[in-house]
Amino acid sequence: MKLTDTAIRNAKPSPKAVRLFDGQGLYLEVTPAGGKLWRLKYSVAGKEKRLAMGAYPAVSLKDARIRRDEAKRHLAAGRDPGAVKQAEKARAAALAENSFETVARDWFARHMADKASSHRDKVMGRLEREVFPYFGARPISEITAPEILQLLRRIESRGVLETAHRVQQNIGQVIRYAIVTGRATSDPTPSLRGALPARRPKHMAAPADDPAAVGAILRMLDAFKGSPAVAAAIKLLPLLFCRPGELRIMRWEQIDMDAAEWRYTTSKTSTEHLVPLSRQSIAILRDLYPLTGHLPAGWVFIGGRTPLKPMSDVAINAAYRRMGIDTRDELTGHGWRAVARTFLHERLGYEPAVIEHQLAHAVPDTLGRAYNRTKFIEERRRMMQAWADYLDKLKIGADIVPIRGVA
C-alpha cells in the first residue's frame, strides 16, 4: 500500500526504527528519535544497496518519488545511483573550492595581510557588497568579460564610477591569482579596458595658496570643543601633514619624545617612515599622554566609544564639518598635504625632493627605499620645525613674505 502525507505525518517513533514502504524500493524510515528519513533499496550486480534521499518534511512524498524515478533511470542506463550521487557531491565540492568567493578570500588572506586595516576593510567590503552576491558562487574559470561588464555598469549606474573602477581592479587581481594557483586559465579583465568612462580625479579640498585662509582655519582648530583625542589630532595633522589614516592609528610605542621622532610603516608603500617632531608637536603629544598613554591598547587617539580601538577614520572630517569647514570645497584632513607641499616650496623655499621624502611618497632612489627613509633627515628636521613656526605665525596673522630657494 502506497504512503500518504497523512500517514507520514501520523507516524510515531518506536524503540526500534520503523520502515514504511511506498513501492519500487522507496520507503520512509522513522527513527527512535523521531526523524523521518527517505531511503531507496536497490540492487547492482546482485548486491543490495541503500540510497539516502533526504528527510521529511524537507523532502516531501512527491519529491521523494521524483528522486526514486531519477535513480531508476540511472539503473536502467547501467549506472549506480549511489555512485552518481557521490560524483555530484565531489563536483559540487570542487566547484565550491574554485568559486570566485573562495579564490577571492584566499587571495585576500595572502596578499592583503600586510596592508593597513582601513584599506583591507574597503577591499573586502567592496567584494562582499558588489561582487559576491552576483557571481561569488560561480566557478572562477567560467566568469566572462560580458558578465563582469554587466556588474560594473550596474555599479556605475548608481553614480559611483570610482567604485566601479576599483571593483574591476580587484576582480582582475583575484582572477590573476586564480591563474597562478591553477584554478583559471585566462583573465578577461584586460578586454574591458576602456569599457568604463575614465576616472574623474578626486579633489582633496585645500586652500590653494592663501596664508590668510590657512591662518583662519588654524585658529578654528585651536578653538575646537570636542573630545581631547580628536582635538589633539586636528591640531597635530597640519604640523605633520601625514595621511589622516596613518595619524589616527598612531601608537605611543612609535613615538620617541626625547629624540622627537615618530616612526611607522606607511599605508601606501609599506615602508618604514620617519617623521621629525617639532616642539609644537611634542607639546601636543605630551598634553595628551596622561589621557591615553596608560591605556593597554596603545592608541594615541582613542575611539569615542571604546579605548580598545583607534579614532574613527571619519572623525577628523566630521570635526571640520562641526566647525563649519566645508570638506567638499574648503578643506579635508588629507588636504593638509597639498597645503604643506605648496607652501613649503613656494613660501619657505624648500626643495621638492626634501618635501616629497617627508610626504612619504615613493621617491625613486638607486639606494632603495630603506635609504629614502632617512634621506635628508637633518634638513627635514629643520624643515618640520620651520613649518611649525610658520603655522604659528599664520595663526596670529603675521605677514609672511615668500622666500624662494633659501633652503
Image (cartoon, rainbow, N blue to C red):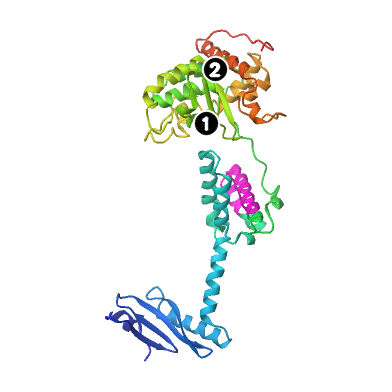
Query: What residue is pinned by disc 1?
Result: 246
Q: Is residue 217 left or right of residue 61?
A: right
Identity, as a three-letter code, of the amino acid under mark 2: Ala
- Residue span colored magenta: 151-177
Q: Secondary structure at mark 1?
A: helix
Q: Is residue 105 above or below residue 333?
A: below
Quadrant in the picture for residue 11:
bottom left
Frontmost residue, 188 versus 263: 263
Quadrant in the picture for residue 304:
top left
- From the top left corner, tell me how far across and down residue 41 is, in percent: 44, 86
Q: Which mark is residue 213?
A: 2
- From the top left corner, tell me how far across and down residue 337 is, in percent: 58, 25
**137 drawn magenta:** no
Q: Secondary structure at mark 2?
A: helix
Q: Is residue 308 left or right of residue 244?
A: left
Which image quadrant: the C terminus?
top right
Q: Tell me which residue sits at (50%, 14%) in the image.
A: 279
Frontmost residue, 274 versus 247: 274
